[in-house]
Amino acid sequence: MSGTKLFSAIEKREIALIKDADNIKSSGKRQRRPRMLDVLESIAPLKIKCVGWGVIGLFWVLGVWAFIAQRVGIFDALFTPMQLLTDMVLILLGVWTIRNAWDIAVLVIYLVVSAISTIWVNELSPTFWLNGSRFYFYIIFLTPIFRWILSKKNRAIYFIEKFDASLYVFLWLQVPSMIFEYVALGGNDQGGGTLGNYMSHIISCLIYCISFYLMLKKWDKEKGYISNLLANWTLIFLLCPTFMNETKVSFIYLVLYFFFLVPFNRKFVRNILITIPFIAVGLVAAVYLYLNTVDVSDEQMSLEWLEYYVMGDDETYEIMESMLDTYGNDEDRDFMRGAKFLMLPAVLVDKPWGVWVGYGASQYKGASVMEKTEFLRRYEWFFFGTTTLGMMTMVDLGTAGIAWLLFALAVMFGWLGPRGRFKGQLQWYLGLQVLIMMVYASNLTILSCALPFIYLVMLSCHWDRVEQAVAWRRQIEQSASEKQ
């Protein structure tokens, strides 16, 4: 259905529904006037309804089930079944919608590289390979799902209207849930909002990304920078819960948030100079709020402590080198990210092929239900606790896996393959988030984060669909007001 025919069909259906409502009203029966989404729902094809509601349902299940399950004490019993169920739904939706040659190439190259690494070179079972691949299936299948949705104007409008409303409600739900966690558990790493305990970095990442996207969507080009922020102050207020947990990278997200809201135009430099004082004030306020809510000392905000937090100290390296030489383990100690990165080359050369194809997908999955591999048992101290997207991919699939990951990200961001109109601000903001993930966290291997994040990435290279959805809403609102 073309764009002109779409609006014509929507308008005709909207007029018919309004007439029906008016006729019923004149007969004495109470009937609400149709909402805009009622109109869109009435003409949407079955497949977009199934895919759209499947994705939205998946988002809400992943977004709230852990918080509820932890409160009633059934989280451990449901964890594995919920993971398998949600992964299965994702794969089915992905297989149903994958059409583009670039997305198929991402899937095929992964299957070849991972099968060679896992089954052939490291001689692990196909079951282990399939289980470990679930980490990478999130990137592989979410991209074609959203590409299919955004490939047609009617699909895009239908889904964007519904899913963006869910994202906004999701932001608001973090306020009471994170306040509850702060009161019950304290200002620490357990403050993961509706995603549950120990998801503090994931929820902070999502809060900033979703708020940033909605701010860009609502941005009025006729207004100035400060005027737009004041007009959308609720989206800034919804950032506050991120300072009720100890995720220190939130300060980086905050600076990037206000920096990349500056429009990329001829006045960019002038606007940046205006923005810098605003960012400074916001950062000072955020630090004050953080120090007064989170259980940290002034010393922990110093550069010396930050260096220790990221890289460790001499004692850290002595312990790690001792474990490396003796294959010892300390399962209760979470070593620093930077220290693990420095030890990564020594771990990879355990076998001649380690640097090139890694040790199989995935060494980071299988320790709870499936048997641990010999490599995992030998270097368990390395796998315990903190990991990052880059580190995980390098250990699992080596440099071949890193090359595949960069290719998959290029396809996802629209740098390769089909795309619409880029939104530079959103591309930069999310691109830097991925760069942070490569060295700081593994967000894209967690479905509750990957689903909304990849949706925003796909919108950043199909911004024309967002503008069409906004224009559609304005036209329908204007049409409805004229008929009243």
Image (cartoon, rainbow, N blue to C red):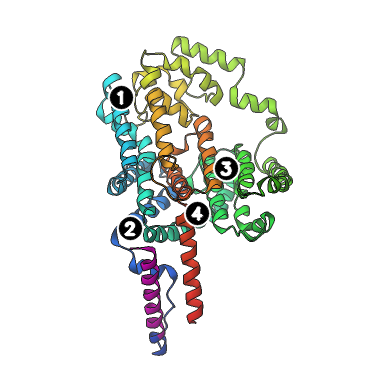
State the SS at label 3.
helix
Q: Earlier in the sequence, mark 4 or mark 1?
A: 1
The residue depicted at 51 percent of the width and 11 percent of the height is 322
Residue 115 located within the stretch drawn in magenta: no
Looking at the rendered image, the disc whose residue lies closer to the viewer, 4 or 1, is: 1
Read off the residue under disc 1: 118
Dot 1 or dot 2: first in sequence order is 2
Asked if disc 4 and disc 3 are in contact, CB closer than 8 Å, the reply is no
Quarter occupied by residue 134: top left
Query: Looking at the image, which is closer to me, 262 or 344?
Result: 262
Residue in the image at 42% along x and 67% along y: 37
Q: Magenta part mainly helix, strand or loop? A: helix
Residue 5, magenta (yes or no): yes
Q: Are marks 4 and 2 in contact (CB under 8 Å)?
A: no
Residue named by callout 2: 48
Q: Please, what is the three-letter code of the amino acid marked with disc 1?
A: Thr
Task: Tell me where the magenta segment starts and ends, as one range.
Answer: 1-22
Mark 2: secondary structure: helix
Mark 4 to mark 1 CA distance (whole Å) = 38 Å
Rate crowding at label 1 as few (under 14), some (14 to 19) or many (20 or more) other CA atoms within 10 Å.
many
Q: Nearer the viewer, mark 3 or mark 1?
A: 1
Mark 3 sits on what residue?
A: 185
Q: Which residue is mark 4?
A: 170
Q: Earlier in the sequence, mark 3 or mark 1?
A: 1
